[in-house]
Amino acid sequence: MRIVFLGAPGSGKGTQAQRLTADFSMVQLSTGDLLREAVRAGTPLGLQAKKRMDAGELVSDDIVLALIREKLGSPELRGGFILDGFPRNVSQAQALEPVLAETGQRIDAVVLIDVDLDILMKRLTGRRTCSVTGKLLNIHFSPQAEIDACLQAGGELLQRADDNEQTIGNRLRVYREQTEPLVQHYQRAGQLRVVDGEGTADEVYARLVNALGLRAK
């Protein structure tokens, strides 16, 4: 099955994609990972990407699409794939279609992991790391016993500098501006499947598998 995953930062789409690939022999295609691999390997596309990144520029859609085109021919993708991080807007979605067609493939489903924006803010701004154990916690959602265990061990709850409310708010605003039209695009194409992203990871996964018509393992 060939799937595009959509979801705002903090929606949990990365976690759900990893579980889906493990259970159904799919490959998660993260454009960030593809870029890093190409740069590390020093491929022609990787060198082009590195030149742009070193100059502080965004890597062009042409380079990203070329990396995806290369990967689509890989035998490891025979069981299907999940595109995570691309497309991010309607123009990228339109450019992706002929790339898939070149290899005789098409997107089977587009999954939107839908979470209320207020909950997303709490998920992202509430993230903390225990300075002693390294355990990831959330001041809004983690059990109080886990937070107390960190503090009683002499630890501090550390927050990443970019997990502040202003930065997170900007990331969510950009997501709404760029990705919401993409959601409408795939809805009109009859490919969109919306999954409620609130609740436990297991609950969300059960809804995801059901929305895709798969049998949970």
Image (spheres, grey):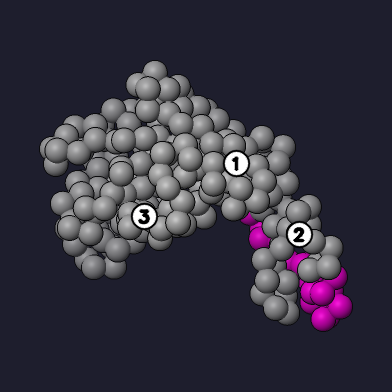
Residue in the image at 67% along x and 66% along y: 136
Residue 81, how many percent across, how many down?
Answer: 31, 49
Q: Is residue 97 left or right of residue 54?
A: left
Q: Is residue 77 left or right of residue 210?
A: left
- Label 1, secondary structure: give it: loop
Between disc 1 and disc 3, whose residue precedes?
3
Q: Which residues are magenta?
A: 148-162
Between disc 2 and disc 1, whose residue precedes?
2
Instruction: Tell us which disc is closer to us: 1 or 3.
Output: 3
C-alpha gap between disc 2 and disc 1: 17 Å
Q: Is residue 182 visible?
A: no
Give the residue type at disc 2: Ser
Foreground residue among 28 and 94: 28
Residue that mark 3 sits on? 24
Q: Is residue 148 visible?
A: yes
Q: Is residue 209 left or right of residue 96?
A: right
Residue 95, how many percent across, how many down?
Answer: 26, 32
Instruction: Tell us which disc is closer to us: 3 or 2.
Output: 3
Q: Assess disc 3: are there few (<14), some (14-19) or many (≥20) residues with their C-alpha within 10 Å of its C-alpha.
A: some
Give the residue type at disc 3: Phe
Residue that mark 2 sits on? 142
Q: Is residue 133 magenta?
A: no
Residue in the image at 21% along x and 53% along y: 78
Q: Is residue 159 magenta?
A: yes
Q: Is residue 93 left or right of residue 20?
A: left
Q: Assess disc 1: are there few (<14), some (14-19) or many (≥20) residues with their C-alpha within 10 Å of its C-alpha.
A: many
Is the residue under label 2 in contact with that under label 3 (CB below 8 Å)? no
Q: Quadrant of the N terminus?
A: top left
Residue that mark 1 sits on? 197
Is the residue under label 3 in contact with that under label 1 (CB below 8 Å)? no
